[in-house]
Amino acid sequence: MKITIIGGGLAGCEAAWQLASAGLEVDIYEMKTQKRTPAQTLSTMAELVCSNSLRSDRLTNAVGLLKAEMRKLDSLVMRAADATAVPAGGALAVDREGFSAYIDQIIKDHPLIHVHEEEITQIPQEGTVIIATGPLTSDALSDEISKLDGLSTLHFYDAAAPIVTSESLDMSKVFRMSRYERGDDYLNCPMDRDEYFAFVHALQTAETVAVHGFEEKSVFEGCMPIESMAKRGDMSIAFGPLKPVGLKDPRTNKEPFAVVQLRCDNYAGSLYNLVGFQTRLTFPEQRRVFGMIPGLENAEFARLGVMHRNTFISSPEFLDDTFRVINNERLYFAGQITGVEGYVESAASGLLVGITLAHRSKGLDVPHFSGKTAIGAMGRYVSTPNRRFQPMNCAFGLIDQLDVIPGEKRIRNKQLRYEKISERALAEVDAVISQMEQK
Ligand SMILES: Cc1cc2nc3c(=O)[nH]c(=O)nc-3n(C[C@H](O)[C@H](O)[C@H](O)COP(=O)(O)OP(=O)(O)OC[C@H]3O[C@@H](n4cnc5c(N)ncnc54)[C@H](O)[C@@H]3O)c2cc1C
């Protein structure tokens, strides 16, 4: 059977790997060496276009659980992430170039995967097709997708954070520490009360880029520009990304009034991104306003924050829980374009599509991951009717809660409950894997 994957990003590469690992031949089309999206800078596949963090790696966090499930299912993205990890406390952050190069090489060297460096402008009319072209799907293909029966393509905008070079920071003002002293992976820029209010007022009044068609309400909450958050109230960012809890400045032995955190962005430790500082300020305004942060007065910006488009389909009316188009058996979608949000979630959807399709192609029963698992819960989210459908990160709220056993008390401690949910999910994944191995 001919299988074509359009898009060699996180989802496309993961799907190709799963299919090829099952012995199936795949053609994958990636346009970036011919035509880059505005967010891309590397020529290798599976590029992380903004933060280098794959977020929490703990089982008390839903994305930590999702990663654990993916590791069990031999995810290529997780292999690459583990092989290229950089220190980031309880999070899993990677060396951006190393991560992409790792995947690129495995995909290009695989004898069953044929990489074509070209843009696809029309959906192939033969064989099975996986569309994994991401939030910045090229215009021609977006047009084609929007013409598919029963679908209305949607667009909205996200914002990405700036990156500074570590050597340009004034380290006499900055201290190194992870929150609650769980290591020392972050750089922290402490602000006193006066510095904080001067900064917030500058942020609230700074000039922003006019984005045609942009609507404030359409910004995804989890990626809200820092200036939009600041405009909600003088203290809003002090309770958000600038919260000082668990960060005692060793020089004063006190928590500062507010703290800007910087997270390492590469192995060498030469680049740091401003955590939570997605922005649509103009470039000169970013230099002026972010230069008010203690320690960043002379910061060199390796990248400034940018606005970007995010294309996603109205999946609930269109896809089943295996990411297959309901009225077109040979067409699948995977990745951010389906309305899952985030690097890990995008890769996870590619993994699910890969496993599903491998089984269908061989005439085998499709493995079922229920809503008790993080991966199954993501598939259920995109395929469940929802008039207000919005891209969504993996969250415990999407995963089935624990059954209440008659006579037993409900577990009130949230961390403990999440641990139990994770334990149950990983046991289900193990059971599905053993069923797959018996086939
Ligand atoms: C600017 C930006 C910042 C983001 N920041 C974060 C972040 O910090 N953390 C996070 O978790 N998520 C972030 N996301 C969201 C999302 O997790 C990533 O976009 C992720 O890479 C999505 O994975 P994907 O595989 O769906 O798409 P992508 O990784 O974008 O892969 C799609 C691939 O398809 C290719 N392509 C597109 N059209 C065609 C075509 N017609 N023919 C052939 N190839 C094509 C592209 O070149 C690309 O390589 C961000 C998204 C954007 C756009």
Image: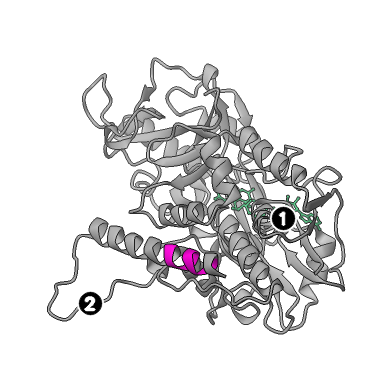
**Residue 353: x %, y % from top left:** 63, 66
The residue sitting at 60% across, 78% down in the picture is 320
> In the image, what residue type sits under mark 1?
Leu
**Residue 93: x %, y % from top left:** 50, 38
* Mark nearer the N terminus (2 vs 1): 1
Q: Is residue 162 above or below residue 1?
A: above
Span colored in magenta:
430-436
Report the predominant secondary structure element of the magenta stretch: helix
The local crowd at label 2, few if under 14, some if 14 to 19, many if 20 or more residues have their Cα within 10 Å, is: few
Q: Quadrant of residue 418?
A: bottom left
The residue sitting at 75% across, 58% down in the picture is 137
**Residue 415: x %, y % from top left:** 26, 56
The local crowd at label 1, few if under 14, some if 14 to 19, many if 20 or more residues have their Cα within 10 Å, is: many
Q: Secondary structure at mark 2?
A: loop
Q: Can the viewer see residue 396 in this picture?
A: yes
Q: From the viewer's perspective, tell me whether residue 9 is left or right of residue 300.
A: right
**Residue 40: x %, y % from top left:** 72, 42
| Mark 2 or mark 1, whichever is nearer to me | 2
The residue sitting at 27% across, 76% down in the picture is 403
Residue 160 on the magenta span: no
Q: Is residue 275 above or below residue 134?
A: above
User: Label for residue 404?
Assistant: 2
Q: Secondary structure at mark 1?
A: loop
Q: Using the numbered discs, state the Cα–Cα distance from disc 2 to disc 1 in whole angstroms.
A: 43 Å
Circles 2 and 1: CB distance less than 8 Å?
Answer: no
> In the image, what residue type sits under mark 2?
Val
Query: Ligand 1 near label 1 (Cβ, under 8 Å)?
Result: yes
Query: Ligand 1 near label 2 (Cβ, under 8 Å)?
Result: no
Q: Quadrant of the N terminus?
A: bottom right
**Colour treatment of the image:** one colour
User: Label for residue 136?
Assistant: 1
Q: From the viewer's perspective, tell me whether residue 351 is left or right of residue 144.
A: left
